[in-house]
Amino acid sequence: MPRYPSRSPAYSSFSFGPGPVSTAIKALIGINVAMFLVTALMPSLRVYLGLVPAWVVRDLRVWQLVTYMFVHAGIFHIVFNMLALWMFGAELERIWGTREFVKYYFITGVGAAVLTILASLLPIGPLQVLYTTPIVGASGAIYGLLLAYGLYFPDRPIYLYFVFPIPAKVFVLIMGAIAFFSSITEVGGVANATHLGGLLVGYLYLKGRRGRTSPWAEVKYRYLKWKINRVRKKFDVYSGGRADDWDRRVH
């Protein structure tokens, strides 16, 4: 994956949306819409395919770790999630490639579900309610995309409530803070712990992915560093010194 650019001057002009719907985004939206129509005809599937931590722990319904991401509670729920998927995901897919993007999407979505289950086992009143509550929606993965978007395009303006422009990095911090404090109180019946889980899993994955190097690359780096130091000693080259001390730089 590329390093996170500190600024994005190439995208400074205003335009609506990130451009055309990319391959993975198109497939994910199609699956979500199809699943929404099926569950609208058979509402009982929402509970069966949604994430219920108690059922995953007791009955080993592990498929819910994945299927809950494709089930939505209502028309506004799916519309806003799919809009966010396109807005924040299209550019990330173009940067990473379809395969890496899909991998990240499922890692953050499934990871958010796992963290939600773990949170529901904690002896904290609002979190314990999650243990028997059906949780649906792609928000865990969407929050993971939001985190990645804030890291890759930190100064890109995001219009809060479609009115107030704020940098993406600030927007991510605001959403993270809301998810954290809301997960403690669970105000409004929204599984904010899942949102927070998506942010945390996304951050840990990207941090590990960025710093990961192959053993062979590390060997080559150490060898090259050893050769440079040897050449410096051979020609008596020293770095450092004051800006006006030319005699100490190279002999």
Image (cartoon, rainbow, N blue to C red):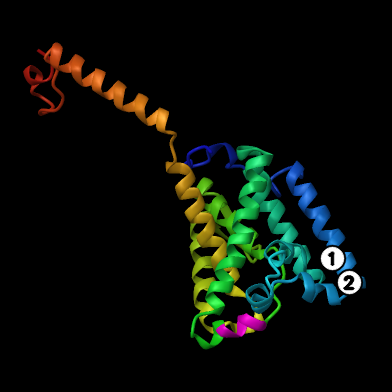
* Mark 1 vs 2: CB contact within 8 A: yes
Task: Left or right? Give the position of 238 relative to 78.
Answer: left
Amino acid beneath label 1: Phe
- In terms of image quadrants, where is residue 188? bottom right
Q: How many discs appear?
A: 2
Q: Residue furthest right?
A: 41
Q: Residue sitting at 76 percent across and 42 percent down?
A: 23
Q: Residue sitting at 61 percent across and 49 percent down?
A: 104
Q: Residue sitting at 54 percent across and 61 percent down?
A: 199
Residues drawn in magenta: 128-132
Q: Which residue is mark 2?
A: 40
Residue 129 located within the stretch drawn in magenta:
yes
Q: Residues within 10 Å of mark 1 (few under 14, many from 20)?
A: many
Q: What is the magenta segment's predominant secondary structure?
A: helix
Residue 53 position within the rendered picture, expressed as x and y whole percent measured from the top left:
64, 75
Residue 110 position within the rendered picture, expressed as x and y whole percent measured from the top left:
63, 60
Can you tell which mark lies on residue 36?
1
Residue in the foreground of this view, choosing between 11 and 147: 147
Compared to residue 247, the image places residue 173 above or below, namely: below
- The answer for how far apart the CA atoms under marks 1 and 2 are is 6 Å
Residue in the foreground of this view, choosing between 25 and 60: 60
Can you tell which mark lies on residue 207?
none
> Which secondary structure lies at badge 1?
helix
Residue 35 position within the rendered picture, expressed as x and y whole percent measured from the top left:
84, 62
Residue 131 located within the stretch drawn in magenta:
yes
- In terms of image quadrants, where is residue 82? bottom right
